[in-house]
Image (cartoon, rainbow, N blue to C red):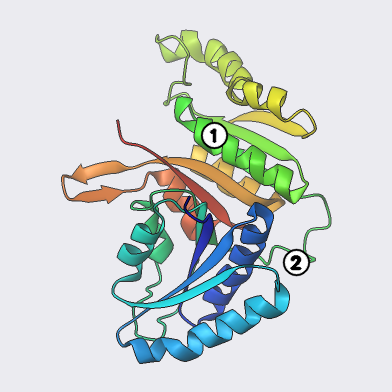
Amino acid sequence: MRERRTVVGVDGSVAAFRALDAAASEAERRATALEIVCCVNDLAEATPVLRSASDRVKERHPDLILRASAVVGDPVQVLAERSRGAALTVVGARAAVGTGGLLPHAVGQRLAVRVHGPLLVVRGREPSGPEHSGPRGVLLGVGGAEAAEAALFAFEEAEMRRTHVCVLHAWTDRQPVYGSPAGPVESDLARQAATAACLPGVAVAPLRETHPQLRVVTWSVRGTPWRALLAATADAELAVIAVRHRRVRPERLRLGPVAQALLRHSHCPVAVIPVPRG
């Protein structure tokens, strides 16, 4: 039986060490080993980074099983491969060029279209920062049937964090609500609004039964989905979204506008849950 593991990419930057701290906490919550990966041009360059990262984890989480390795190669390709079978893969956002110049600014966005399991991109404010005094929950963005895996991740994460789940659905009159009947915008608008109001609750109804102890808040807003979700991240400790990769050309994948906006501008860490291409 393969050892359960949480994978984190480090490069010696401040952003990478924030990701390391988050990954260690996630590994502890999940009772997994922590695998630290440093991608460099020269293996010798990784030694001080891995030593510093390992010492930091051992001091703060002495009971964690720890693995550390240096790899020559592009971090996106390496971490995408390491994500196979991992419980979670973690990277920092706005990472500066690191030890071999191999960890670029948009590593989270590039990895999000290649990862084989849940990806946590650590960005925004410090999770324990004092700037928000109210309770912060796990924010789940839903848009349709593809949200099932993301919803399960959000509920499990909220349970481990001992917090609540906020389920948000945003819609516009230009974008029919998932499950609503087709028809002229004028005559359908009221029906779309009613359908939209029900969607967040319907999307998580089965999980409410299996996680009865969790408090769940659902709401639907009329507005651009990426704008609504981005605004809501200001009051969340984690945002969770499902991502169905869009194929632009046979050899190129890209993220949709919601994922792009959150990975670039979210006020809190973002968990990306990939949806297999149909």
| Residue 26 visible in the shown view | yes
Q: How far from the left and from the top, in percent, is residue 21? A: 63, 70
Q: Give how far apart the Cα atoms at labels 2 and 1 are.
A: 29 Å
Q: How many marks?
A: 2
Residue lying at 30% horizontally and 84% vertically, measured from the top left: 41
Residue lying at 39% horizontally and 66% vertically, measured from the top left: 106
Which quarter of the rendered picture does the C terminus lie within? top left
- Frontmost residue, 210 versus 100: 210
- Frontmost residue, 122 versus 158: 158
Picture layout, residue 121 above or below residue 150: below
| Residue 141 visible in the shown view | no
Please give left or right for residue 125 compared with residue 82 in the image: right
Label ID, residue 129: 2
Q: Residues within 10 Å of mark 2 (few under 14, many from 20)?
A: few
Q: How far from the left and from the top, in percent, is residue 139? A: 64, 43
Picture layout, residue 141 above or below residue 120: above
Please give left or right for residue 278 compared with residue 37 in the image: left
Q: How far from the left and from the top, in percent, is residue 124? A: 60, 63
The amino acid beneath tag 2 is Gly
- Frontmost residue, 193 versus 30: 30
User: In the rendered structure, which disc, 2 or 1, sits on the residue that comes first in sequence?
Assistant: 2
Q: Mark 1 and mark 2 in contact (Cβ < 8 Å)? A: no
The amino acid beneath tag 1 is Gly
SS at mark 2? loop
In this view, the residue farthest toward the front is: 1
Residue lying at 53% horizontally and 54% vertically, measured from the top left: 4
Q: How far from the left and from the top, in percent, is residue 264? A: 47, 59
SS at mark 1? loop
**Mark 1 lies on residue:** 223
Residue lying at 51% horizontally and 35% vertically, measured from the top left: 149
In this view, the residue farthest toward the right is: 133
Q: Nearer the viewer, mark 2 or mark 1?
A: 2
